[in-house]
Amino acid sequence: MPFSLTPKDSSFYPLFTASAQNLVAATDVLSEFIHDHARRPELAEQLRELEHVGDQSTHAIFRQLNSSFVTPFDREDIYKLASDLDDVMDFVEAAADLVILTGLGTLPAEMSQQTALLQRAAQTTAEAMPRLRTMKDLSSYWIEVNRIENEADRLYRRLLSRLYSGEFDALEILKLKEVADQLEEAADAFEHVANVVETITVKES
Amino acid sequence: MPFSLTPKDSSFYPLFTASAQNLVAATDVLSEFIHDHARRPELAEQLRELEHVGDQSTHAIFRQLNSSFVTPFDREDIYKLASDLDDVMDFVEAAADLVILTGLGTLPAEMSQQTALLQRAAQTTAEAMPRLRTMKDLSSYWIEVNRIENEADRLYRRLLSRLYSGEFDALEILKLKEVADQLEEAADAFEHVANVVETITVKES
Amino acid sequence: MPFSLTPKDSSFYPLFTASAQNLVAATDVLSEFIHDHARRPELAEQLRELEHVGDQSTHAIFRQLNSSFVTPFDREDIYKLASDLDDVMDFVEAAADLVILTGLGTLPAEMSQQTALLQRAAQTTAEAMPRLRTMKDLSSYWIEVNRIENEADRLYRRLLSRLYSGEFDALEILKLKEVADQLEEAADAFEHVANVVETITVKES
């Protein structure tokens, strides 16, 4: 690690926090979307808007990166952290869109549970982002997100087991899997965010 | 960034350009393949040959990397750029092969449109590769590829919407999705190439 | 590359070797699982235990990484190598679990062949890991794993071709693809491990 000759630029932290708070908002809207059949078109539109807001945060981080001489941690890691936060949003928005595209009605209870886990992952992430400034107490964050991802994985398999139990025909399975896979990918993407934070911490240690 | 004590090796640029031009050729063949039902076996064979040519470019880059003391940008980025260009080729070749493996006949119009976007992405990429030498005017390239990828994503969702509209049975949906997913992954892979170029530019700035 | 002021920590090598040997054990159990219908529940349980052992190796590597001042190669590469080895185990365990979740009975011969390739990839990887210490004779390893992955890819396509040949209905195809995709991803993940080793060698050269 080179010595910093100038104060490290601190303006990245609020941008990461804003990105993660946007995910809290998005996973909350997704939860309403899952449960409130009638309001789905309106809530999907809200998710598209939140995705747009997220894109703006991501590009603000990239612009900041391009104009900063000294960064608080490796440029590649800042880039990866911003991209991975962006990925979560893409999967959350896609999950809702696919419910509408496939014309699915009432969704299996496991999908509400998947969404509840995403809400928890988003909150944990949003609470951790400001701690990047001091690099303290971050291990509890990534341990919790890893735990959530393990739970999401078990839940996803329980859902698959149900999908193939004989209750659904091939067409319904195909449709439900489109959505379930996006929710599972969103949980994985939260873990990727946590992995970047862990990598940053390892480098700084 | 360390000072370069020797002139930076310039022989990477023609290799990247050759890789990207190979993608122009491959996406052009894919377009013929989609439209010209009768010539599919012959055109799939052409794609396998182009993939083989692509593999040789990729390995030429890796060999060059192993024998260069000083590289024009980070070794990891050269490695990643070559691998990501190679990935595009793999998805393009797989898309054609899966049409044949699944025995699909006439393909939905959305797949011609997906392929037209891949052709545009390939051309944009091949035009940008020589500009890696000066690192100038590259932002227009990655902005355009990101735009193409967004359009490809909307198109992919429109195709999914059609697949689940009731027009197709489960088996046909499965077959069409095998192909559609490869085309979508090819568009994503072009974006990954653009992301590496953006990362290289960020590091050099 | 900075000069090492202290002897490089050598305790990573046995940990990588242990991780890879665990994959030899897991792919051997998977092979029994594929063939011995009656013992599947018991063998799936053995795979879950091996996955747990693998997780412990992975975390031992991460802890070692956090407490080492000097590492034998880049921290990011150690992190990535451990994660990629862990990924292989996850796909192997998931393949078996999905056979049980989907209630599949006798599996197509191509899946035994996929599994035989995974066994070969695991053995090749386990034999190569101790050679990371001297960084010698590693190219034969990654060339062999790349060859195995190419063979696995051809086999996967042959399996897809059979799945869509008319022998299976949509529901059976869906179930068989769940498993086939995990086996294919395991082969890809072995290649990712080999790619990290190649990257490390390139950096050190």
Image: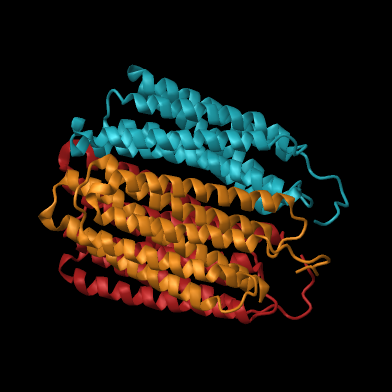
Chain colours: A orange, B cyan, C red
- Decide which of A99, B31 is in the foreground and name it: A99
Counting from the top left corner in percent of width and height, residue B91 is at 45, 38
In-image side of B83 versus A45 (left or right): right
- Decide which of B163, B179 is in the foreground and name it: B163
Judged from this view, the residue extending furthest toward the left is A166
Residue C132 is at least partly visible in this image: no
> What is the total number of numbered labels drawn onto the structure image?
0
Judged from this view, the residue extending furthest toward the right is B5
- Quadrant occupied by the C terminus of chain A: bottom right
Q: Is residue C74 above or below residue B174?
A: below
- Decide which of C198, A38 is in the foreground and name it: A38
In-image side of A76 versus B109 (left or right): right
Counting from the top left corner in percent of width and height, residue C80 is at 55, 64
| Residue at figure coordinates x 30%, y 43% from the top left | A41
Counting from the top left corner in percent of width and height, residue B158 is at 34, 33
| Residue at figure coordinates x 33%, y 53% from the top left | A181
Residue A29: quadrant of the picture: bottom left
| Residue at figure coordinates x 50%, y 52% from the top left | A86
- Quadrant occupied by the N terminus of chain A: bottom right
In-image side of A14 versus A92 (left or right): right
Residue B181: quadrant of the picture: top left
| Residue at figure coordinates x 23%, y 64% from the top left | A158
Counting from the top left corner in percent of width and height, residue A152 is at 34, 66
Residue A131 is at least partly visible in this image: yes
- Decide which of B111, C167 is in the foreground and name it: B111
In-image side of B104 versus B129 (left or right): left
